[in-house]
Amino acid sequence: MISFELSQDEQSLAGMAREFAETRLRPVLRECEAGRGVPEALGKEFFELGLATLALPEELGGVGLGPLSRAIVWEELAWGDLGAALAMPGPGLAAHALMVLADGAQRAEALEPFAGRDGFRRRGALALFEPGFGGPPEFRTVARRDGPDYVIDGKKAMVLNGGLADLVVVVATLDPEAGWDGLAAFLLPGDTPGLAWGPRRETTGLETATYADLVLDGCRVPAGAKLAGEGAEAFGRFLAELRIEAAAQAVGLARAAQEHAARYATQRKAFGQYIAEFQGVSFMVADSATEVDAARWLTWRAGWALGLEPGAGTGHPPAGELAAAAHAQALAAARFVTDRAVQVLGGHGYVDDHPVEKWMRDARAHAVLNAGGNPAWSDARLADAALGLTARPAPKGVPA
Amino acid sequence: MIDFTLTEQQKNIRDFLHWFAETEIRPIAREADRLGDVPPGFFKKVKAMGISMEAIPKDVGGEGEGAGEVKDRRGQRQTNRLSVIASEEMAWGDPAVVITLPGPGLGGPPVRLIGTPEQKERFFSVFRAEEPRWAAYAMTEPEAGSDVAGIRTTARKEGDVYVLNGTKTFITNGARASWNVVFATVDKSLGRAGHRAFVVENDRPGFKVTRIMKKMGLRASETAEFVLDDCEVPADNLLGGEEHYQRQGKEGFKVAMATFDSTRPVVAAMGVGIARAAMEYAADYLKQNLMLDRPVPAYSRIRETLAEMKRKLDAARLLIWRAAWMADAGLPNSREAAMAKAYAGRVATDVCTLAVELMGPEGASRDHPVEKCFRDVKVYDIFEGTGEIMRVIISRRVFQALGEAG
């Protein structure tokens, strides 16, 4: 039965996240940006509220939320400040790899340090994308079996928490010719020999978060470091998780800008009236509000579908396709809405008296730095669906 | 709980209507467009099957009469959700044929919303006839479209009748209708508080259809203009009766306007149905064709365009479902209904335009249906409130909500 009503649990989760976003993230948004990180006390609070471990099961100290509930929480956090929320301590994007690809023992072992006394100082990272334009099936980071070990060689680009991470999940191919089917992920301690971080990369937005490139040069790991899940199906699900989270973040970012611009329009006067009364302005506000909602419902639908038992027969396309739609749409919406917000504020939107210029940069950066990948890849996946090609193997270079 | 699953009933109705659209509607669509009318034999068949714009056949879970409400197993209304699912599917077949289906059409909701029990019985009983029957909704005038507060048709009370004078235009099924819901003013100086809704039977003296309009699209659908020239209707035809307006004052008219909050998502859903048809056709066509010796879909620009079309239609559908869900739950949904209509109207028009473009010169040919989708869909960004009026409504509600939040 079609329903858009949040459950009691989801309402209280959203309320908790919104309160944190409003009282902790918003007031320090510029300080965090200038400081290129979050204060340790803020990180500790985030961690202790469970916001860093939303996806992890309760027995491993997590909150055990499904993709839909996490999307609801992430929209609120991103509404507060996406850069800061991404810069927070915790297993971060590695958690998704541990949930989707690792087996129970690997997961427990990797997460144990986060449950310790200084767990709130630890960070995880996901080294997924590579320099150049290739998607996962074209990855050139190769893991080669050598006796009891794997040896990994290659380069990864713009890794969130690069240089700060205590554990890194590296996605590599076991067979460069095998495309999606060759993919595997490896869990590496941050101090593994042969693993070298480049300097912190300066970015156009999301500057509170840290991005760095990674070089893997003869990086030797025991065979047990390879996470259990591999191949097209596992990585399709993994990417769907990443895309839904990135989409929810984009929705939160867009909503922040939309609300700010609408409020400004009701307070600023020109030619003797509030600018909200000019249709040139009010239509931008209307379009922005509509784009935010449209992106949110696509995101929720994808999260809802991914959270169901496989084969649940939703009557909708597969969750991976829904995640691609949400991802492409939400990232486009964030770029559009933040741009309109700057436009509504005019010159005031371009300077740091208001956060909209930051949000516009954040949205631009998010669309290319997010872990779900380039939205164009999501659109390629959707094109296959529109053409009725989904049943066939994805063409080379087009992620599932 | 958040849920996007269709119920068994909704699935059955969707599948049934998809079959109906494919096997009964599509085969006559092109000819109906050329003739500017729906072949009369079609209505008899439809009547026998028990299908009208709002009435869903009983054997697939509906009520069959159009005046009732469809409820789910827990007793919650689901009329609106069912309507948007049904409309998308039928418009995928052909929108002009669909809006010409017999039944009360847009005339139904005002009677249902504010009509007295006696009026509901009197006006809906028309549809029990063997022959197909229609009703219509007459708001727009040559000088007042979106600005409904500016209507000039007057209603003057004389004893126990009202005398109506004015011109109404852009009335879907207005000439073939047994009755029209006509909006008029009893006193222009009162503004909206002076507005009244009357049911005017088409055989009243002084009711004269003056023009059937020729349109860019939806050609098989009748769009009429009529004049009310000292047209007398009994005072009993004032919808809701005098008491309704005394009780509600200015609100009386607002209730009539509330019609739009349930019809806009339905209209938006039809836009999505048309665009989906165009997109599917264009995609199938492209798959079978080569351009510079490569299959057309091998070009990334083509793929990108198709993907954007697809996800925007999905987004539009979810905005529509959201508005319909709110209406079923009894929540105020003016903002959401306007969002659904604004977004779907724009996106559906864009998608059909792109479908023509993707097919190249063939896209403009009448040998393919996409040129017709392109012509048909444009009005979905215009009628039931233009995209611009939708944006006025949305922004007003957004600003209002900020005021309420302090």
Image (tube, coloured by chain):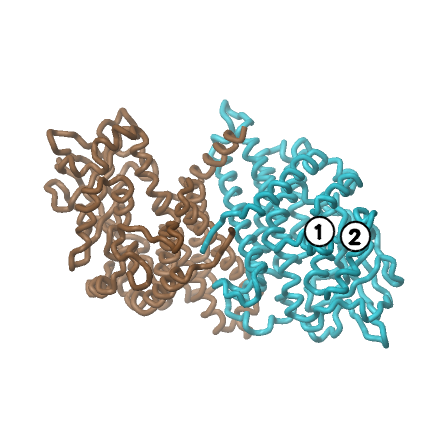
Chain colours: A cyan, B brown
State the separation of the CA atoms marked 1 and 2.
10 Å
Amino acid at the residue labelled 1: Thr
- Residue at (61, 45) in percent of width and height: A13
Which mark is drawn over residue B82? Answer: none
Q: Residues within 10 Å of mark 1 (few under 14, many from 20)?
A: many
Q: Is residue A356 visible?
A: yes
Q: Which residue lies at the image location 57% right of the left edge and 37% below the top edge?
A: A259
Left/right of residue A234 with respect to residue B382 in the rendered view: right
* Image quarter of the N terminus of chain A: bottom left
Q: Where is residue A268 in the image (x, y as percent from the top left)?
A: 56, 27
Q: In which image quadrant can residue B389 be found?
A: top left
Q: Position of residue A163 (x, y in %)?
A: 83, 52
Mark 1 and mark 2 lie on one chain; the one further toward the N terminus is 1
Q: Relative to residue A279, is residue B113 drawn left or right?
A: left
Q: Looking at the picture, does residue B365 appear above or below residue B320?
A: below
Question: On residue A53, which mark appears?
Answer: 1
- Residues marked 1 and 2 touching at CB (< 8 Å): yes
Residue picked out by circle 2: A114
Are the numbered discs 1 and 2 placed on the same chain, yes or no? yes
Residue at the spot 42% in from the left edge and 64% down from the top edge: B363
Q: From the viewer's perspective, is B292 left or right of B237? A: right
Chain ID, mark 2: A
Image position, residue B326 (x, y; %): 43, 45
Tell me residue A179's x, y (percent): 68, 72
Residue found 65% across the figure and 52% down from its top: A367
Q: Is B179 in front, or is A109?
A: A109
